[in-house]
Amino acid sequence: MSAENTPLKGQFITFEGGEGAGKTTQAKLLCDALEGAGITTILTREPGGTKGAEAIRDLVLGGAADKWSGMTELLLMYAARMDHVEKIIKPALERGVWVLSDRFADSSLAYQGYARGLGAERVGKVHEAVMDGFEPDLTILFDMDPIMAQKRVETRGEDLSRFDAESIEFHKTLRNAFLDIAASNAGRITTIDADEPRQTVHTQILFALTQKYPDLAGRLGSAAG
Ligand code: TYD
């Protein structure tokens, strides 16, 4: 193993995309695959991941769609994120643990910045002020036609959160927002086609990991080789 390829320090990998694209399931599958490869990995989510951030999550996801203004919503997301980064993400990375997060800051840019209309510039200013250059090592974007994604959410029969209940137009805007963000951050974000069977999506993710971390190829099983 060459020194430059050896992923010694903890890596921060985020999962992004619209609703119903299967991020949560895939994050769990990747967590198991990494653990199977001998890499200590934690799986977390946003908004949430700490006691305080989960309390903010309840505040922000419950209730009517117009309960919060776009900026208030953004600040709540960043308050939750700060707690999460300080208490969970950075300490884990410092211990050499890999961190997988089901959503992170790209969601704020896509949802609050684009879909809720705050604008990328205002979101970017808040982001810089709070995160101070901290960002994921790798982001997997789950791309999917929102109509197909909505069918998946309905089939799951879950309660619609404040966000799931938004119109299909909102979700189309969101999809384009994420694709724009991916185009502007091509070095960090890998887009995968999420409208595929579970195992195919998992294989795409393993492939993305081995592209970024070549030494993982032999360790993540045949799908990635
Ligand atoms: P969740 O039920 O976890 O949705 P999903 O399974 O699609 O991830 O709810 C999280 C919701 O919060 C989701 O609609 C996206 C939204 N969100 C934002 O609007 N801004 C953010 O910064 C984050 C992290 C999430």
Image (cartoon, rainbow, N blue to C red):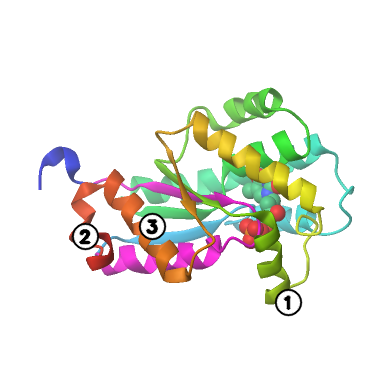
Quarter of the image for residue 36 reads: bottom left
Q: Nearer the viewer, mark 3 or mark 1?
A: 3
| Residue pictured at 26% horizontal, 47% vertical | 213
Q: Find out whether the residues at labels 2 and 3 contact each other: C-beta distance under 8 Å.
A: no
Q: Position of residue 75 (x, y in %)?
A: 73, 37
Q: Say which mark, if any, is on residue 114.
A: none
Q: Nearer the viewer, residue 219 or 128?
A: 219
| Residue pictured at 80% horizontal, 38% vertical | 70
**Residue linked to disc 1:** 157
In the picture shown, does residue 162 fall above or below 70? below
| Observer able to see residue 23 | yes
Inspect the image, locate mark 3, and give the three-letter code of the amino acid beneath it.
Answer: Gln
Q: Nearer the viewer, residue 31 or 89?
A: 31
What segment carries the magenta color? 8-37
| Observer able to see residue 79 | no
**Residue linked to disc 3:** 204
Inspect the image, locate mark 2, and give the three-letter code of the amino acid beneath it.
Answer: Gly
Q: Position of residue 117 (x, y in %)?
A: 78, 33
In the picture shown, does residue 4 fall above or below 87? above
In the picture shown, does residue 168 fall above or below 188? below
In what element is the residue under mark 1?
A: loop
In what element is the residue under mark 3?
A: helix
Number of residues whose C-alpha sits closer than 10 Å to that of mark 2, classed few (under 14), some (14–19) or many (20 or more): few
**Residue linked to disc 2:** 225
